[in-house]
Amino acid sequence: MRVAWFSPLPPSQSGIAAYSWEGVGALAARGWQIDLYAPTLPDRPCPKGVTAYRAVEFVWRHRRRPYDLPVYQLGNSSAHDFLWGYLFHYPGLLVLHDGQVHQARARLLLERWQPRLTDYLAELGANHPGIRTDIGHLIAAGYGGTLYSRWPMTRLVIERSRLTAVHAPRLAARLALEHPRAVIRPLCHGLIDPCPGTLNLPAAATAIRARHGIPADAIVLGAFGGLTPEKRLPAILTATARMSSAEQPVHLLLAGRTYAHYDIADAIQAHGLGARAHLAGYIDDDEIPGYLAASDVCLCLRWPSNGETSGFWTRAIGAGRPVITTTLSVHGDLPLCDVGADASPSPEAIGYRIDVLAEAEELPVALEALVRDAGLRERMGRAARHYWDANHSVERMADDYVRLMTEAAARPGGDVALPAHLRVCGEELAQALLRDSGLSDVPWQATGGVPG
C-alpha cells in the first residue's frame, strides 16, 4: 500500500506535528512506505522508508503513480490550512483531532487577501442544512465566540472521507450518531515513551529547575502547550497565588507558545507570582522529558473544549505524573477522582477532575491534596504510568493505524453534495493558462497537474 500522509511537521509549533512524526516513525519501523506532504519540509531526517515532499507536489506525483490511500491529520488551527485543497478531491482516512474546525476554516476563508464570504456562507449551509446562513455574517464580523462550537462545520469532511478516526471513543460514538452515513472509528492516541529509561531524568530535572531558578525542594506545577485562557490559566494563577509557600514552596512552570490576545507575563505579575511562576517559552521535543521530570503535578485543564485529546495530558501520564483535568464528556471513561469531602482516590486514580462550574472551589482543594501528600503523588503517578502503558503507547497506536488504513483503503470516498467552490480542482484554469501560453498540446494530465 502506498500512503500519502498530509500533516504539519516539525518544526511547526503544533502538537499534531510532533504526534504525526512519531506515528509515522512507528509505522515506518514496521516496513510501511509513507510519503509525507506538508507546506514545508521537516527540519530533521525522515525515518527509513519515509520521504517528505512539499504539499504542492502531491497532484503530479499522484497522477504519475497513484497512491492507495491519503491520510489527513486535520485540526482546528491554521497549521492545517493546506489540507483543505486536497481532502475533498482525494478522499482518504481523516484523522480528526478536534470536534470542530469552524474557527480555522472561517479564518482561512474570511481573512485572506481577498475574503471569500460567499464561499464561507455556502460551506456553513452545506455543513448545517437548515441553518439560516445569515448567522455567518456575525462570525465574519468577529462575533464568533461560542457560535463556532454550536456549528462545528465537520459534516462535509467526515461524510466525504472514506473513514474518519478520532481519539476519544465517546466522541467517536457521538459523531457516529450525528453522521450515520459515515464510517467513524476510535483511534488510540499514542506517543513514544515520554520518559525513556535511557535518559538520566533526575539530572535533566535538576538542570531544568536550575535554569529557571526553581528551588530544589519546591513542588512544581507544570502546564504545557498553548498558553491561553482556554487552558484555564487565570484560574491556575489564582489558585497558585493563594497557596502559602512558607512551609512548602510551590512553583508554576509554564512551557508553550504565547499569544497576543492573552498576556501571560502580565497576568503572572498581576497575581503577584513573579518569583514563583516561570515561562519557558516553546520547548523542543527533546526537552519535553526533562520538563516533565521537573514537574511534580501536571495541570491539563481546558474549557471550552472541542473534544480534542491533549498531547500534553498523554505525555504527562506517560511520565508518571499525577494530573488535574477539567471534567469533560470525552474524559468520562478515564480513572480520575472527583473533588469533594466524600471523595477518596481509588488505587487506579491517575489524578483529579475539576467541574468547570466549581473551578474556583475545587482546583485549590485538588492542588492542596497533591502538594501536601507526597505519597498520594507517588501512587497516582504509578497509576498514571500503568494506564499509559495499557492505553497510549505508540505501538498500540501503530496497531490501530494499520487496521484503519487497511479498512479505509478498501472503501470509496463518501457521496456528499459539496458547494460549487469545493468541486473545482483547478484543472479548467490550468487548461486555460496553457492555451493562453501556446502550450495546449502539452500532455499535462499525464505528467503533471495543479495544486489541489
Image (cartoon, rainbow, N blue to C red):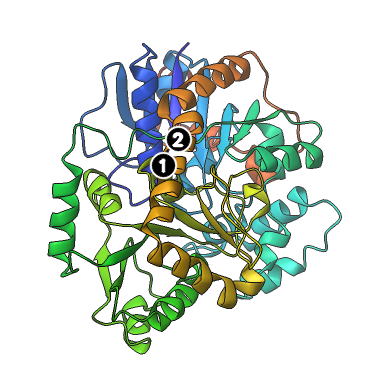
Residue beneath the point at 64% across and 56% down? 328
Residue 93: quadrant of the picture: top right
- Look at the numbered disc 1 and give the secondary structure of its residue: helix
Residue, disc 1: 382
- Look at the numbered disc 2 and give the secondary structure of its residue: helix
Compare residues 376 and 355 and report the one nearer the observer.
Answer: 376
Residue 285: quadrant of the picture: top left
Question: In the rendering, at what x and y percent does residue 80 appear?
Answer: 47, 46
The mark found on residue 222 in the picture is: none
Q: Are marks 1 and 2 in contact (CB under 8 Å)?
A: yes
Does residue 239 sit above or below 375 in this rendering? below
Does residue 51 sit above or below 113 in this rendering? above
Compare residues 4 and 189 and report the one nearer the observer.
Answer: 189
Q: Amino acid at mark 2?
A: His
Question: Within 10 angstroms of label 2, few (less than 14), some, or many (20 or more) residues?
Answer: some
Q: Amino acid at mark 1?
A: Arg
Please tell me how many numbered marks the rendered image carries.
2
Residue, disc 2: 386
Question: In the rendering, at what x and y percent does residue 113 appear?
Answer: 46, 63
Residue 246: quadrant of the picture: bottom left
Work out whether residue 385 can be spotted: yes
